Image (spheres, grey):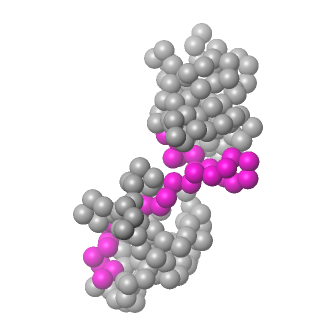
């Protein structure tokens, strides 16, 4: 039996409540948009502190994300899952061809091509045009755009994010 490493999972929300009487669940998505998960074959629910995989029978996005999981066939079974955290596997993909789940990079060490180690990625803010990474260097907050153009590499094994930030950006925060 394969064991699931919780470090390879990211929490995306929680089961809000049963939806109807056939075991469907209303998912409250707190990370990303409900449509981001339409193609998911399975989700993990945190039960007694352990991630348990549930295969998806159907996903509908109408007035929220309504999910029918295999082996959850009535309202009583669905009620048992209400309030449980929903997790998915972190997206560890090739930066050339597919999008990366940026929030999975929180805690990675950020290295700039010019300045070297900036510090650990403390948080990511979602702005209308782009995502902003936040780290602290010498006790000062540094904000920087997280775009394909500025991310030069990601080493998941070493938990490192390599960026090539525009000239002068770091100096704005440090001076």
| Residue at 69%, 54% in the rendered image | 98
| Residue at 58%, 34% in the rendered image | 161
Left or right, residue 70 beside residue 94 = left
Left or right, residue 50 beside residue 93 = left
Whether residue 71 appears in this view of the structure is: yes
Nearest to the observer: residue 153 or residue 43: 153
**Quadrant, the N terminus:** bottom left
Where 49 falls versus 126 (above or below)?
below
Quarter of the view holding residue 27:
bottom left
| 104 falls in the magenta region | yes
Nearest to the observer: residue 16 or residue 81: 81
Q: Position of residue 151 (x, y in %)?
A: 68, 36
| 34 falls in the magenta region | no
Instruction: Tell me where the magenta segment starts and ends, as one range.
Output: 77-106
Quarter of the view holding residue 62:
bottom right
| Residue at 43%, 61% in the rendered image | 87
Nearest to the observer: residue 170 or residue 10: 10
């Amino acid at each position: 039996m394969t064991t699931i490493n919780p470090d390879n999972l990211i929490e995306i929300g929680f089961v809000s409540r049963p939806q109807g009487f056939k075991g469907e669940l209303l998912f409250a998505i707190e990370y990303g948009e409900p449509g981001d998960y339409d193609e998911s074959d399975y989700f993990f629910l945190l039960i007694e502190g352990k991630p348990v995989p549930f295969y998806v029978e159907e996903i509908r996005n109408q007035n929220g994300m309504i999910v029918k999981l295999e082996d959850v066939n009535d309202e009583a079974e669905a009620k048992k899952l209400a309030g449980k955290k929903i997790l998915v596997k972190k997206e560890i993909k090739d930066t050339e061809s597919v999008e990366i789940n940026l929030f999975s990079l929180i805690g990675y060490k950020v290295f700039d091509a010019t300045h070297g180690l900036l510090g650990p990625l403390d948080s990511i803010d979602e702005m209308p045009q782009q995502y902003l990474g936040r780290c602290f260097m010498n006790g000062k907050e540094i904000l920087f755009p997280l775009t394909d153009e500025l991310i030069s590499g990601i080493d998941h094994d070493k938990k490192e994010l390599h960026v090539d930030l525009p000239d002068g950006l770091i100096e704005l925060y440090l001076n």
